[in-house]
């Protein structure tokens, strides 16, 4: 039975304790059905692979900690117990991540490991395993961006032909992994709880055979199976049916059997095996669960996936698809000699005397957990936030880098509505979100709790003390110490767009529009008449265009030789994108322009330019493209004047070119384009991408 919430949440009491009407509850159900049909949730195989990758990452990080301890002369007893800790945060930890989204991950290390070692030595270790590893050390929060790829059968079974051998791990709590994927459709969701999956394995019993790891909000046990007596490596393929829990239990016990101490524990396992054996055999027949035996000489190597020379896995006649998992990895060093499972990152005393980058890195996890603790109903919060994030993505309104709300800002703003209306369903929260924020008296801040200052010499958001905080246009304040403004990048142009989209969404909800209309894709390139196209170039990169005319070996060789250029172009593109909002603010000063909002996405032009060359783009250049809309003022007098934007462009170029990592081949080309020409270019680019997809 649903019990209304009467507890006070947030800095004020609730605006209403009423419950939702039956009509709103029915609309919530239709919303769930629409989101499922939109395929925004993880597939089963993607959810499993995410957990396996996190388990392997945790194992690698422990090895890195031990290696650093050995290098620095720690005692053998200290090295044996030396570990780090990894935590997820952001949308993945909140339980509202979309299909294909990245995993924000925090690596916490003891005091004897420094940031330089993380970005140098651990980077080398990651390069041996992951398909792509990029360092972004000059970011506001330094990070490494990882990409892992795995080939799976279309039917849901993971292929063994194109996998990293050392990622052959067993997931013991597969039901929990699936339940965290679709929070609205499962009552088993526990986003902010740690579940003890294996009580027999204690922290001090870790070794190379079995590594017990808590990864963020989920308890992951990664069992690295060694060579058995017959020299064979066994790996279980899990099917789709959640009824395989009996099979999971058996494999868990069998894998643990070699480690149990004492005859009593061994007998318990055998008794449990007999108890479930009949049921297991039946489940195996129904689900066609297979155990694949691979001779050690045929074991997949630890060569990174999708590097030159690697091919897709082959399977028993089923179609294959590539699952790509992206991870953003940040680092924090605590003033502790030992990091273990008792560590509570919400303990603010850990921040004492920490370096600024570690504080910022820890803040991601701390903010996520604090948000979850401050909402009255986590299930309603999950559903409403997932909807708002999908709406923002469809309407091109997400991207902290470009001056829009990021994931944290959306989570806090939705959580505040949940505090004000604690007893309603998701649909009511969504309606109230647009109703309240379209009338919000900015710059009045959105806050979930009162700001606290622990006097740890860390800057806390306070416009009365810090003059720069007064200029934040739509402040959304993080709840954990030290409180910060998550929307400090918002500018006049993006604020104007945001208000217009809030009005549109509210109107559609009041009118009872269909969900496909509410979530209709952005009209950014139809709304404005003129645009500034920003081409981000790496010249003399040898980017060729027509793969059909070359052999597979030639293509492979070119990919290998162009890896460095691709990395350099990505680095240059990231540098430009991180500053593109400054070009918008410079354009806002032009008299004839009412606003200049950037489009929060970059288009890859490499390959496309070979078939559709542009005269102002050099040949053999790696190229990406982004846009800024030029929103003309309504004044007829101003419209008759010519618009001069040369000065803002030159000032922006001077700013981004003044970068110590820039080479002479890194360049920018900017062109003013009419709406018709932009749409033709984007349609051609879309057609090219579709042909490329069909050709894979």
Image (spheres, grey):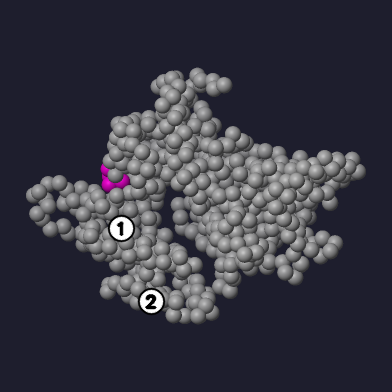
The residue that appears at 9% across and 48% down in the rendered structure is 636
Work out whether residue 187 or residue 638 is closer to the camera in this orientation and state it: 187
| Quarter the N terminus occupies | top right
What's drawn in magenta, residue-wise? Answer: 492-496
The residue that appears at 30% across and 33% down in the rendered structure is 511
- Residue 194 versus residue 530 in the image, above or below: above
Tell me the tag on residue 369.
none
The residue that appears at 45% across and 76% down in the rendered structure is 547
The residue that appears at 76% across and 40% down in the rendered structure is 199
Q: Which residue is mark 2?
A: 620
Is the residue under label 1 in contact with that under label 2 (CB below 8 Å)?
Answer: no
Give the structural element (helix, strand or loop) at label 1: strand
Residue 409, how many percent across, how many down? 42, 40
Answer few, some or many: residues within 10 Å of disc 2's Cα (few below 14, many 20 plus, some between 14 and 19). Answer: some
> Quick check: 596 left or right of 15?
left
Residue 370, how many percent across, how many down? 53, 35
- Residue 390 versus residue 565 in the image, above or below: above
Q: Which residue is mark 1?
A: 627
Residue 489, how many percent across, how many down? 36, 46
Whether residue 562 is visible here, answered yes or no, is yes
């Amino acid at each position: 039975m649903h019990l209304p919430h009467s507890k006070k949440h947030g800095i004020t009491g609730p605006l209403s304790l009423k419950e939702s009407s039956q009509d709103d509850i029915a609309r919530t159900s239709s919303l769930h059905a629409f989101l499922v049909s939109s395929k925004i949730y993880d597939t089963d195989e993607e959810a499993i692979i995410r957990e396996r990758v996190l388990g392997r990452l945790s194992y690698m990080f422990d090895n890195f900690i031990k290696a650093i301890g050995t290098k620095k002369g720690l005692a053998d007893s200290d090295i044996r117990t030396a570990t780090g800790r990894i935590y997820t945060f952001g949308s993945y930890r909140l339980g509202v991540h979309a299909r294909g989204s990245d995993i924000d991950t925090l690596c916490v290390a003891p005091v004897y490991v420094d940031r330089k070692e993380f970005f140098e030595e651990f980077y080398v270790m990651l390069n041996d395993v992951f398909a792509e590893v990029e360092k972004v050390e000059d970011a506001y929060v330094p990070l490494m961006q990882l990409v892992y790829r795995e080939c799976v059968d279309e039917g849901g079974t993971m292929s063994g032909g194109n996998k990293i051998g050392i990622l052959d791990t067993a997931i013991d709590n597969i039901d929990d992994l699936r339940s965290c994927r679709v929070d609205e459709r499962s009552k088993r969701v526990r986003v902010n709880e740690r579940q003890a999956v294996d009580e027999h394995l204690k922290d001090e019993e870790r070794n190379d055979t079995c590594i017990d790891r808590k990864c963020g909000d989920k308890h992951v046990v990664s069992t690295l199976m060694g060579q058995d007596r017959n020299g064979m490596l066994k790996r279980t393929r899990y099917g789709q049916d959640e009824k395989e829990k009996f099979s999971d239990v058996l494999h868990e016990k069998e894998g643990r059997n070699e480690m149990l101490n004492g005859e009593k524990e061994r007998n318990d396992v055998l008794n449990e095996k007999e108890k479930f054996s009949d049921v297991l055999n039946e489940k195996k027949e129904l689900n066609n669960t297979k155990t694949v035996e691979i001779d050690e000489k045929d074991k997949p190597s630890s060569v990174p996936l999708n590097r030159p020379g690697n091919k897709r896995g082959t399977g028993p006649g089923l179609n294959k698809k590539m699952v790509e998992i992206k991870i953003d990895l940040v680092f924090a060093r605590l003033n502790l000699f030992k990091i273990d499972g008792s560590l509570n990152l919400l303990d603010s005393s850990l921040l004492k005397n920490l370096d600024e980058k570690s504080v910022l890195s820890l803040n991601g996890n701390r903010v996520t957990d604090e948000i979850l603790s401050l909402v009255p109903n986590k299930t309603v919060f999950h559903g409403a936030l997932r909807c708002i994030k999908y709406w923002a993505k469809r309407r091109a309104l997400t991207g902290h880098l470009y001056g829009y709300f990021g994931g944290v800002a959306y989570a806090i703003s939705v959580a505040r509505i949940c505090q004000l209306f604690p007893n309603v369903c998701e649909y009511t929260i969504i309606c109230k979100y647009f109703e309240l924020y379209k009338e919000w008296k900015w710059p009045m801040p959105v806050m979930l709790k009162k700001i606290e200052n622990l006097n740890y010499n860390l800057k806390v958001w306070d416009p009365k003390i810090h003059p720069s905080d007064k200029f934040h246009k739509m402040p959304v304040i993080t709840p954990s110490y030290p409180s910060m403004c998550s929307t400090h990048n918002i500018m006049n142009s993006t604020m104007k767009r945001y208000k217009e989209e809030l009005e549109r969404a509210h109107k559609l909800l009041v009118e009872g529009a269909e969900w496909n209309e509410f979530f209709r894709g952005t009209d950014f390139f139809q709304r404005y008449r003129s645009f500034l196209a920003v081409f981000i170039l790496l010249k003399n990169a040898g980017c060729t265009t027509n793969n059909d005319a070359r052999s597979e070996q030639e293509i492979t060789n070119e990919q290998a030789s162009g890896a460095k250029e691709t990395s350099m172009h990505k680095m240059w593109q990231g540098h430009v994108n991180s500053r593109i909002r400054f070009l918008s603010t410079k354009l806002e000063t032009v008299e004839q322009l009412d606003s200049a909002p950037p489009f929060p996405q970059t288009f890859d032009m490499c390959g496309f330019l070979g078939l559709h060359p542009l005269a102002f783009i050099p040949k053999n250049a790696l190229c990406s493209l982004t846009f800024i809309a030029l929103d003309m003022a309504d004044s007829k007098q101003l419209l008759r004047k010519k618009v001069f934007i040369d000065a803002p462009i030159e000032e922006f170029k001077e700013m981004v070119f003044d970068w110590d990592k820039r080479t002479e081949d890194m360049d920018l080309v900017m062109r003013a384009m009419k709406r018709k020409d932009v749409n033709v270019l984007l349609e051609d680019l879309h057609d090219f991408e579709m042909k490329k997809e069909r050709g894979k």
